Image (cartoon, rainbow, N blue to C red):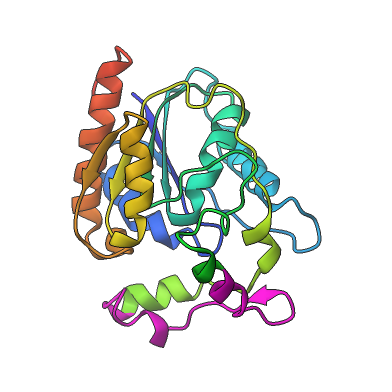
Amino acid sequence: MATFLLLHSPFVGPATWNWVAQVLKQRKIPAIVPILRHRKDEPPYWKQHVEQVVTALEHLTPKEPIILVAHSGAGVLIPAVADAIQQPVIGSVFVDALIPQDGKSRLDLYNTKEAADEFRRQARDGMIPPWTEDDLKTAIPAPSVRRAFVAQLYATPLAMYEEAIPVPDGWPDHPCVYWKWTEHYESQRRIAEQAGWRCIETKVGHFYLLQEPEVVADQLVEIGNHLLQQAGLEPF
């Protein structure tokens, strides 16, 4: 059996995936949600995050198959994570996420330069302020879920959005799937389609995984079983 490795954007917290992980574990399907944090004055930040993922997998055997799943800004970490961990990655799933391009930053991958510049203008003393509960009332309607999500937010360095993130040679060397939720990521879906990846579209909000964790878990299991079949492994 494979293990789902669920990566949250470094700009939010593990609550992003915790409810989905709980559903998977209730079904006896292994799922790990590494906590991605940073030390402000020790860039590169992406390398810190990759090291934290490696540490989160230390209890697994080196032969444990991994299905990498990334949401939003975590997408750009997938190649570096796949390259760093000991375990074999049998597939990667980008969930409303950025697709990395070698040497480009998250802001480089924004849909337009104007949008990137607007984002930069939010910075105060080099830091991007976190969302508040009021900011997320529409995106995360359930008050208790929204409160738990916001409790893990903190200001993040603008430099984290601007740092170039490498893509190792030969990536991807395994099947990739793109699961688009919002129109904001349509350009990313087109890139995936052009690359020949399997693409799925569900017209929901960007934080759908907090609203319908069981439905998201269902789809991940379906994707996971397809990847396991491609790898010649037993399904969940």
Quadrant of the rendered structure where residue 224 is?
top left
Helix, strand or loop: magenta stretch: loop
Location of residue 161 in the rendering, given as x and y in whole percent from the top left corner: 62, 60
Quadrant of the rendered structure where residue 162 is?
bottom right
In this figure, what is the number of numbered marks? 0
Report if residue 213 is visible in the image: yes
| 133 drawn magenta | yes
Q: Quadrant of the N terminus?
A: top left
Q: Left or right: 151 with respect to 209?
A: right
Residue at horizontal 33%, vertical 15%?
Answer: 231
Viewer-side residue, 159 vs 144: 159
Q: Residue furthest bottom?
A: 134
Location of residue 223 in the rendering, given as x and y in whole percent from the top left corner: 25, 34
Quadrant of the rendered structure where residue 213 is?
bottom left
Location of residue 126 in the rendering, given as x and y in whole percent from the top left corner: 72, 74
Q: Left or right: 47 with respect to 106?
A: right
Residue at horizontal 29%, vertical 44%?
Answer: 24
Give the residues in magenta.
117-143
Residue at horizontal 67%, vertical 41%?
Answer: 51
